[in-house]
Amino acid sequence: MRTTAALLLSVGATLFATLAVAQPHAAAAAAEADAALMRLADDFLDDFYFPVNPTLATEDGIHRYDEQLEDYSRTGVERQIAALHAYERRFAGVDAAALSERVRGDRDLLLSYIRSALLSLQTIRPWQKNPDYYSSGITASAFAIMEREFAPPNERLRVLVARERLMPAALRAARENLRDAPEVFTRIAIEQLPGDVSFFAHDLPRAFAAADDAALNASFRAVNDQVIEALKSYQTWLRRQLLPRSHGDFRLGAGALRAKLSYDEMVDTPLDRLLAIGFTDLRRNQAEFARVARQVEPDKSPRQVLAELAADHPPPDRLLESFGATFDGLIGFIDSHRIVTIPSSVRPILRETPPFMRATTFASMDTPGPFEPVAQEAYFNVTLPEKSWDRQRTDGFMAQFNYPVISNVAVHEAYPGHYIQFLWMHGIDDRVRKLIGANSNSEGWAHYCEQMMLDEGYGQPGVGAQDERQAHMMRLGQLQDALLRDARYIVAIKLHAGHMTLEQAVDFFVDEGYQSRQVGEVETKRGTSDPTYLYYTLGKLQILKLRSDLQAREGGAFRLKDFHDAFLQQGFPPIRIVRRALLQDDSPTL
């Protein structure tokens, strides 16, 4: 008869042996589940994602589709919908519990992307409501080939000619598809079209002046002229025929807005709760603006200090130079204060925003695609005032580019914002995460960096600022941009839920967001077609909470640089996926 101890030893040995056998089998099963999911992901990317989005493929550095153009026809839309439903079923059928944490995040990313695409095609329907979807769409397709020298001029011109041949058909499809267009969408398209025409008439020919194949150049001139005439005809049609019957509603409605936030950002917080969070942040930033303004000018109101801030800007012809002057100080501070690893010493190239992008953006970072093997330049775009504007309009426009805001925008777009996140993408060995992500991560990271850099000491006297007054002004510049993003956050919800008019939105940007009326008008127009541009503040608040939660867990072991590096190693998925990776839980993101 065995003793109890002997029996326990025997059972333990048997259990250990069983586990020793089971663990390799479990690991092998998990590895196979991961591999199967990634094979399905490759099928989706290679058989649907790139073929359906040839412009995006060019931008991503995949050049097999450079001669192709998106299928803008109603039949093409219906084919996309059918294919997306099929892929949704396949990804949803994968057992998420069988996957590793990283690959489970990829599955969630792809499912959310597919459901967002279906929401866009079936419910939001820009192909049926937004005329700029077509004219700016084909312009962006040509620009993707022109922008970077990924091949010799003759080869790039050859594929451009092939792509341009398909563009008049896209504009014909627009006339067949457009129904219930909102007036604001039609007016934006009409406003953008002169820039589109100018791009094809002037920018493209100049860009390919080095092409020396005579027959190819003749083909280009012929097909380019056809595109220009098609765009001019489209502009006339918009003005004379579509605009008078543009009575559609640009608003998504509360249901579609909730769905879009759920799919794009993996945020399912009720809209009224989101709105309360936005107003809390707005009031906090307004109070801080008032406090800092009193330190600058005790006898003046915050509005008067804001007017002084707005007036302190460079001449328009020195604007690009002023942005470039910030780089050395920012890079030095990031290195000396151990903010984040900078993977490369190569700097972005400053340039004026391309014409067809100027109606709705002031500054942007345009980085090469993650798979671009040759042309790897990154461009920091800045929109300059038009030379034809009068003094009042120019001054109103330049108010947003005062010197403190220039520093803040450089942090957002370049160091350590978008450009640094782009540099980190080179080291991510995950095809899905190189391509698919969330604005609340990428824009949230860049917006978070604006506050974080000043909180860590940048902008203090001798460290980005000349004296204490300039340090206060830099904080005011950061807060003014934070208020702009707060205003976007609130306007997005109230506008698309039907609780705010366009005129009220402009006033909100001016009165509550501390922006000029010109900026308020542009921002409101953007919000009509970018309904979730609340993702700046949304992402920033989620990152701040993630950092706080991680710091509470790690205590004295927490290091800011380690947190930032770990964050960027995840790619740019919704913050919920990053939380799972860094905290190993699924706790609330807000």
Image (tube, rainbow, N blue to C red):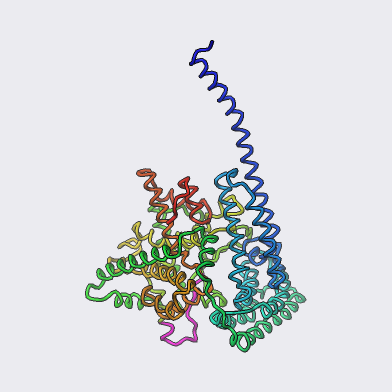
Residue 567: percent from left, percent from top: 47, 52
- How many numbered markers are drawn? 0
Q: Nearer the viewer, residue 376 or 502?
A: 502
Residue 119: x %, y % from top left: 59, 65
Q: Residue at x 60, y 54 (%)?
A: 432
Q: Viewer-proximal residue, 419 or 377?
A: 419
Q: Report if residue 350 is visible in the image.
A: no
Residue sitting at the far front: 1
Q: Quadrant of the N terminus?
A: top right
Q: Residue at x 61, y 64 (%)?
A: 117
* The one of 189 and 410 positioned closer to us in this rendering: 189
Magenta segment, which residues? 381-395
Instruction: Work out whether residue 149 or residue 302 is closer to the camera in this orientation and state it.
Output: 302
Q: Position of residue 189 (x, y in %)?
A: 58, 80
Q: Is residue 323 visible?
A: yes
As drawn, the residue found furthest toward the bottom would be 240
Question: In this rendering, is residue 138 above or below 585?
Answer: below
Assign the C terminus to one quadrant of the image. bottom left
| Residue 334 image-quadrant placement | bottom left
**In the rendered image, the vertical position of residue 450 relative to residue 238, given as above or below:** above
Quadrant of the rendered structure where residue 373 is? bottom right
On screen, residue 50 versus residue 314, left or right, reads right
Residue furthest to the top: 1
* Residue sitting at x 59%, y 27%: 18
Name the residue at the left extreme.
299
Residue 189 painted magenta: no
Residue 84 horizontal side relative to residue 485, left or right:
right
Residue lying at 59% horizontally and 59% vertically, measured from the top left: 113
Residue 190: quadrant of the picture: bottom right
At which x and y percent is residue 137?
A: 62, 73
